[in-house]
Image (cartoon, rainbow, N blue to C red):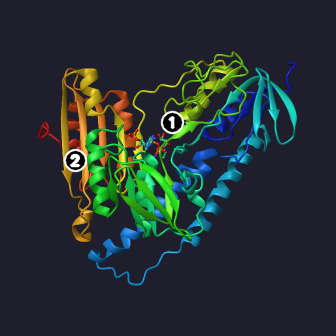
Amino acid sequence: MTKYDYDLFTIGAGSGGVRASRLAASYGARVGVAEEYRVGGTCVIRGCVPKKLMVYASEFGHAFEEAKGYGWSAEGVSFDWKTLIANKDEEIDRLNGIYIRNLKNAGADIFESRAVVKDPHTVHLVKENRDVTAERILIATGGAPWVDESVPGHELGVTSNEVFHLEKLPRHVVIAGGGYIAVEFACIFKGLGAEVTLVYRGEDILRYFDRCISVQVHDELKRLGIHVLTQAVFTKIEAAGGDEKRVHLSTGTVLDADLVFWAVGRKPSTQGLGLAEAGVKLGKNGEVMVDEFSKSSVDSIYAIGDVTDRVNLTPVAIREGAAFAETTYNNNPQSMDYAFIPAAVFSQPPVGSVGYSEYDARKKFGAVDIYKTDFRPMKNTLSGSQQRTMMKLIVDAASDRVVGCHIVGEGAPEMIQCLAIAVKAGVTKKQFDETCALHPTAAEELVTMKTKWVPNL
Ligand code: NDP
């Protein structure tokens, strides 16, 4: 019998923390888990899952219009925000219940409390005002939206924490940022009927994706009627009576809005957790510095997921959690492989991407061959929609290996999930060419691109 209350105490019951805890418990570890908000974490409670439900909701806004070209009449359709939010909340409650049940069924104890690290083997449960001890502590507290507090009136804006609980559908939304959340919510609000302005500090939104994705999504946002203002940041936000706010930009432009939305990134949630005091080394954004097995600078303290600021995606946190549990409680050392992680942006149309951007591939491999196509998908012929699909393959010229695949278009995330298997396994362009097309699909273009693409410089 060990001298500790638990073998493992996990702080944070999001995707990563829950996976690590369940798996550790299944291998016989005595596990405690503390969560200060709701079991399920950002992804389930106020991130990927409710966001995707809202994406589906907003897509209907365009679908009713587009159905007319196929003979449907869709007169007098209306949208009710309260119904969407209530149904979304019900689904999130259901998932929250499943997460709690799964943890309990695995034998873990759940504490609905903030927990802070007191020393390398002690956690203080704030709500219960008591300490528990553990042989190992796992930090899985994720991240939180960041707001530029130097902007006067910044508190008049909301973040992705609040946006899922708005009382009513806003009429005019002004969003700061040009990353995942800014782009996804610009499309969501536009599809639901709001006027949307995106204010981005740089030139190319979705900057860390292949440039063809940035350009294509930028064009599609404009096609949807979203105003995209680049090279601009908020300088001041003022209350303008009722729900109205006035947003001042660095360019001198002034925008009126009833919703101002900060989507300028997230920061690891380590503030006030007692980590530095316990000897845990933190990085410049407050992230927990860990080795390949997710161990921190303190032998008994580990960290997984967004709090380590490695690759901030749910499936990565889940795999890091699983690798930790396998290594520590199943005598099966594993570390996360970060190569060729697929990514999606649920814009309209959505983005799917795996592997190197053209820019990064040229730096890494030198000579690369590019194959690119851009077309109006068949569905949009009768619908009248001008939305286009872009597909791009990046091939290492020396080995013929496909090292990057980037798609903007309906179904892109679904295509990329499947393509990621082949790309990770080392598929060559020749093997793409040898694969028979499936007709009529948009995806068949992936195996029929024969001519190397040369950009118009
Ligand atoms: P991102 O990192 O995606 O984007 C942040 C945006 O804010 C960038 O455009 C950035 O500009 C801009 N920005 C940063 N600092 C400032 C500043 N001081 N003033 C003005 N603009 C600024 O963050 P998000 O908040 O959109 O999303 C957070 C994370 O959540 C993502 O990185 C991703 O890991 C995850 N996520 C994943 C999703 C998915 O998988 N579909 C969906 C939603 C979130 P610049 O480009 O110039 O740096």
**Mark 1: which amino acid?**
Asn
Determine which residue is flagged by label 1.
312
Q: Label 1 neighbourhood size at 10 Å, few (<14), some (14-19), many (20+)?
A: some
Quarter occupied by residue 138: top right
Determine which residue is flagged by label 2.
445
- What residue is shown at x 42% (from left), y 56% (from top)? 248
Q: Is residue 307 left or right of residue 429?
A: right
Q: Label 2 neighbourhood size at 10 Å, few (<14), some (14-19), many (20+)?
A: many
Q: For numbered disc 2, what is the local secondary structure?
A: helix
Residue 296: x and y in percent read 63, 20
Residue 401 in view (yes/no) = no
Q: For numbered disc 1, what is the local secondary structure?
A: loop
Label 1 near ligand 1 (CB < 8 Å): yes
Q: Is residue 97 left or right of residue 247?
A: right
Pick the quarter of the image with the N terminus. top right
Would you place residue 229 above or below residue 291 in this image? Answer: below
